Image (cartoon, coloured by chain):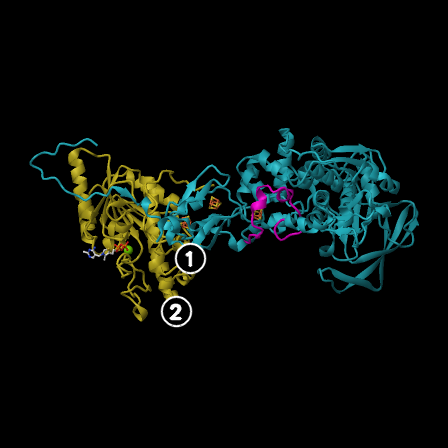
Chain colours: A cyan, B yellow
């Protein structure tokens, strides 16, 4: 500073002027609580059988980082298009936002990302681990088989998928109607699986004999054949020609047939196949009636599907079972026996028994049976627990043969038969095999436990591969841990759909596309439970300027020289991505340097 | 989305405010919005200490420490001196506590704003004389324990409405702000900065030590005060034009009081009475705002 001339007649003021900053005071020594960044687990990701990192996916989508969001799905699920279309989204049922206003439309966002990736022809940046020597055969090119092959490929294994049909996809291609899952969406997912390095051999029917010789060329065989044969009704008349099998009917439609179905069709069953058949009958000009032995709320079909079916004019007749089918002048006379409720089982479903002799006769044009499916071949059934058999949550390992290890997955090992459960079993099987080959059978169960998401029963590939998710706490964030003051009530998007009238005549997809602006608005609603979304609240509210921005993925760190441990940052983090713990002397940098 | 608050800080860490001090947060936000072309006039209060005991300082802007009752008069003098030097770009800011504003400094403040001195007066309100050990001030709310309203002698007078007292002077700008609403606070500071004449900001600043609350809920309490209409956010231009910045839907005050040790003696009956008072004040404000 240059000396300023002071006019001689003015007496200068002598102020004591401070010349040091307070930075010499290491106020960190005052601290008896210590804040720390710690990401936690969102409940949605625990409920998602594919273990998707949903909170992160929504955050990335909200920031317009659609490719990164889509890749985040692909790390856990090779079927974003398929699941975005047909998943029954158990994640949404537990979404914390549901306690605030309405759950985040997670499923619609998944489909939005898949569509965006397809439209822009995104190529995922997912590299396979270094090549392993073991080779694996996958029997069945359905969702579980393709998932197993995809994850094994990511882990560096060479996989051959054997598919009996002319094209891969299994139930996705031949079972689920196009109005729910359009072919291009499925084909895009499958082509990405192939691009990752999975070899699919179609038109090859695998028999039991194959397993005997498999050991020569393969170290393991994944068996994901699923259910392909409809269960029998076991009533007089069911073997009549003309009584249709639900699955076979759906299969014919997917092969391009479009039979006219005038008049009344009765569909027996209450699962997703029954609903798919009924909604297909509507589209073929018929009048469907579903006859189910329990109540609507007991139906195994996904509730959203049931509502859409009813909306399209499907009639539901509850508490009836068919007792006979008799042909009559080109029609059938179906006799339905009324049931009555005796109580409820432990899952709240009605327990029923025949209600006296009360019956009703019905004249119908067609009868479809859809009371569930069973496996076509007995060797596909997983073995029971025992020496050399490891039964996991969604797959079973059988090491008894001494040659190729057998891994069972798909519908046969899952309690809930859904596409996303098939993904779960394929992934779990892939991880289990990797553990088996690298570390031996004894560690499989405990290592699988280590890569479960939160307190759930589904694995995460990212956790297994020790990616960033590995460092998260498995604590599942509850709604009470969200600082809801930072959120405003806002309506969940309504999935745009074809008008009812438009739906009835075609097999066009019912759900219409969600726009990018809708997706950004919807994902803004996500709390990102337990995950830092860089909102900067912690930085902003610190009274001690002790949060410092940096270039780490966390974006900031705490300067423990000054942090007094007030805890404001932890409480003002809207999403519980921080934690306040008791300070221990050794850890306190402030105390050491201050020496007080 | 991150809150929209200017990036630059004009404070050093290592200051000696209590953990979770709302007054420290208030200054941090204020300076972010104000920038460095200011001189702070600081009458005796907690901030006299937080700003640093000689030879230390925690602020990157000039500060004049001054006597408890002189916030208004010293600022008038500093302004006059700057004007004589031809420095019109520097803003003079008095930064005072509630004791220094509502009580002992009130005369100097009233005099200064009556003359419409060209300065900003910020009162950070922690609702008692905290620096000397939690004595009651005329800002201490009805129902509060302090060391001079102990035990059963808890304060039975209502908090003085300081903004209305300033508004009665018809100053160009008077506003309330809260540390829990940084965007609103920053906007008001930026607005005040561009107005000439006397401007008054009444900033709610939690005091974990004096209020007997855990430090981590410092911001949460400040937020509740606004959400429950205990501390409404509003601004008044030229003594007449009222704008309410935040309108809560319903405002049960009970939980706000239940969380604080200074109110722990209050019965449900007392709380019901307080609720009445809060409702009454709010109705009055709505009327003034013409809503
Ligand atoms: C004339 C005079 N009386 C008393 C004091 C002692 N004193 C210093 S700070 C203070 C309390 C200030 O209270 P407030 O203005 O509310 O600020 P706070 O400390 O609460 O931040 C008192 C009484 C003084 N400095 N000068
Ligand atoms: S708010 Fe977001 S992160 Fe939290 S449960 Fe819902 S979708 Fe998951
Ligand atoms: S807000 Fe600042 S001082 Fe308080 S605990 Fe967090 S980092 Fe430490
Ligand atoms: S407050 Fe915001 S920036 Fe800080 S940890 Fe939480 S989410 Fe991340
Ligand atoms: Mg005070």
Rendered position, B142 above or below A546: below
Disc on the earlier residue, 2 or 1: 1
Q: CA distance from mark 2 to mark 1?
A: 18 Å
Note whether A341 is above or below A507 in the view shown. Answer: below
The chain carrying label 1 is B
Is there any visible trace of residue A497 in the rendered image? yes
Q: Is residue A128 left or right of residue B243?
A: right
Magenta: main secondary structure: loop
Chain letter of the residue carrying label 2 = B
Horizontal relation, residue A245 to residue B235: left or right = right
Which residue bears the numbered disc 2? Answer: B267
Does A26 lie within the magenta span? no
Q: Position of residue A357 (x, y in %)?
A: 86, 64
Residue numbers of the magenta segment: A453-478
| Percent x, y of residue B13 | 35, 45
Residue A564: image x %, image y %? 39, 51
- Label 2 residue SS: loop
**Residue holding disc 1:** B251
């Amino acid at each position: 500073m240059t000396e300023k001339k002071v006019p001689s007649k003015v007496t200068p003021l002598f102020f004591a002027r401070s010349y040091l900053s307070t930075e010499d005071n290491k106020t960190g020594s005052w601290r008896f609580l210590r804040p720390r960044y710690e990401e936690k687990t969102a409940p949605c990701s625990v409920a998602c059988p594919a273990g998707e990192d949903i909170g992160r996916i929504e955050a990335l989508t909200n920031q317009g980082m659609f490719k990164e969001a889509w890749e985040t799905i692909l790390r856990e699920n090779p079927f974003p298009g398929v699941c975005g279309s047909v998943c029954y989204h158990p994640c949404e049922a537990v979404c914390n936002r549901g306690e605030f206003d309405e759950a985040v439309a997670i499923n619609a966002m998944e489909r939005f990302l898949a569509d965006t990736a397809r439209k822009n022809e995104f190529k995922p940046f997912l590299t396979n681990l270094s090549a392993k020597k073991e080779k694996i055969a996958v029997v069945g090119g359905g969702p579980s088989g393709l998932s197993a092959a995809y994850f094994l490929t990511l882990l560096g294994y060479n996989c051959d998928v054997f598919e009996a049909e002319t094209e891969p996809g299994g139930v996705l291609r031949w079972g689920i109607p196009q109005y729910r899952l359009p072919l291009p969406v499925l084909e895009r997912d499958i082509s990405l699986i192939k691009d990752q390095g999975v070899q699919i051999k179609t038109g090859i029917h695998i028999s039991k004999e194959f397993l005997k010789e498999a050991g020569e060329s393969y170290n393991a065989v994944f068996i994901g054949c699923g259910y392909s044969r409809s269960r029998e009704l076991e009533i007089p008349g069911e073997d009549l020609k003309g009584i249709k099998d639900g699955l076979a009917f759906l299969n014919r439609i997917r092969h391009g047939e479009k039979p006219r179905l005038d008049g009344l069709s009765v569909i027996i069953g209450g699962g997703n196949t029954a609903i798919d058949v009924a909604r297909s009958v509507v589209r073929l000009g018929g009048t469907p009636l579903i006859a189910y032995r329990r109540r609507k709320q007991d139906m195994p079909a996904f509730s959203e599907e049931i509502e859409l079916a009813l909306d399209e004019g499907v009639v539901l007749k509850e508490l009836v079972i068919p007792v006979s089918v008799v042909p009559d002048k080109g029609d059938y006379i179906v006799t339905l026996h009324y049931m009555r409720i005796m109580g409820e089982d432990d899952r709240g479903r009605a327990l029923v028994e025949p209600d006296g002799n009360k019956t009703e006769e019905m004249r119908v044009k067609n009868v479809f049976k859809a009371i569930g499916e069973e496996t076509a071949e007995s060797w596909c059934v997983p073995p029971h627990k025992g020496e050399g058999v490891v039964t996991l949550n969604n797959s079973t390992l059988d090491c008894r043969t001494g040659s190729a290890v057998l891994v069972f997955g798909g519908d046969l090992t899952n309690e809930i038969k859904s596409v996303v459960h098939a993904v779960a079993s394929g992934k779990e099987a892939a991880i289990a095999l990797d553990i088996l080959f690298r570390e031996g059978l004894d560690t499989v169960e405990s290592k699988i436990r280590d890569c479960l998401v939160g307190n759930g029963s589904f694995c995460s590939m990212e956790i297994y591969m020790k990616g960033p998710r590995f460092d998260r706490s498995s604590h599942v964030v509850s709604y009470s841990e969200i600082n809801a003051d930072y959120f405003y009530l806002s309506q969940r998007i309504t999935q745009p759909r074809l008008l009812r009238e438009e739906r009835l005549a075609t097999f066009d997809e019912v759900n219409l596309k969600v726009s990018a602006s809708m997706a950004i608005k919807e994902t803004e609603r996500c709390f990102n439970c337990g995950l830092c979304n860089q909102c900067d609240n912690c930085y902003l509210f610190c009274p001690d300027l002790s949060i410092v921005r940096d270039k780490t993925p966390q974006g900031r760190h705490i300067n423990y020289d000054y942090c007094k441990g007030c805890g404001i940052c932890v409480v003002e983090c809207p999403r519980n991505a921080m934690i306040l713990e008791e300070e221990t002397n050794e850890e306190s940098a402030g105390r050491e340097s201050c020496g007080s | 989305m991150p809150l929209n608050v200017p990036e630059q800080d004009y404070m050093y860490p290592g200051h000696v405010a209590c953990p979770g001090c709302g007054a420290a947060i208030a200054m941090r936000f204020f300076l972010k919005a104000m920038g460095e072309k200011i001189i702070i006039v600081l009458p005796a209060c907690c901030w006299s200490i937080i700003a640093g005991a000689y030879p230390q300082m925690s602020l990157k802007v000039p500060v004049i420490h001054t006597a408890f009752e002189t916030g208004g008069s010293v600022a008038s003098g500093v302004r006059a001196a700057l004007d004589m030097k031809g420095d019109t770009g520097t803003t003079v800011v008095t930064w005072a506590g509630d004791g220094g504003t509502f009580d002992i400094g009130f005369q100097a403040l009233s005099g200064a704003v009556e003359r419409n001195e060209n300065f900003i007066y910020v009162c950070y309100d922690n609702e008692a004389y905290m620096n000397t050990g939690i004595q009651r001030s005329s800002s201490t709310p009805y129902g509060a324990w302090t060391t001079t309203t102990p035990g059963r002698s808890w304060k039975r007078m209502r908090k003085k409405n300081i903004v209305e007292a300033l508004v009665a002077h018809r100053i160009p700008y008077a506003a309330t702000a809260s540390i829990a609403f940084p965007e609103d606070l920053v906007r008001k500071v930026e607005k005040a900065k561009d107005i000439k004449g006397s401007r008054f900001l009444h900033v709610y600043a939690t005091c974990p030590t004096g209020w007997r609350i855990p430090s981590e809920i410092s911001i949460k309490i400040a937020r509740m005060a606004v959400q429950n209409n205990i501390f409404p956010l509003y601004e008044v231009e030229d003594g007449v034009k009222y704008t309410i910045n935040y309108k809560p839907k319903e405002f049960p005050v009970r939980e706000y009081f239940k969380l604080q040790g200074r109110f722990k003696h209050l019965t449900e009956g007392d709380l019901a009475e307080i609720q009445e008072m809060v409702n009454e004040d709010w109705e009055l404000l709505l009327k003034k705002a013409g809503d």
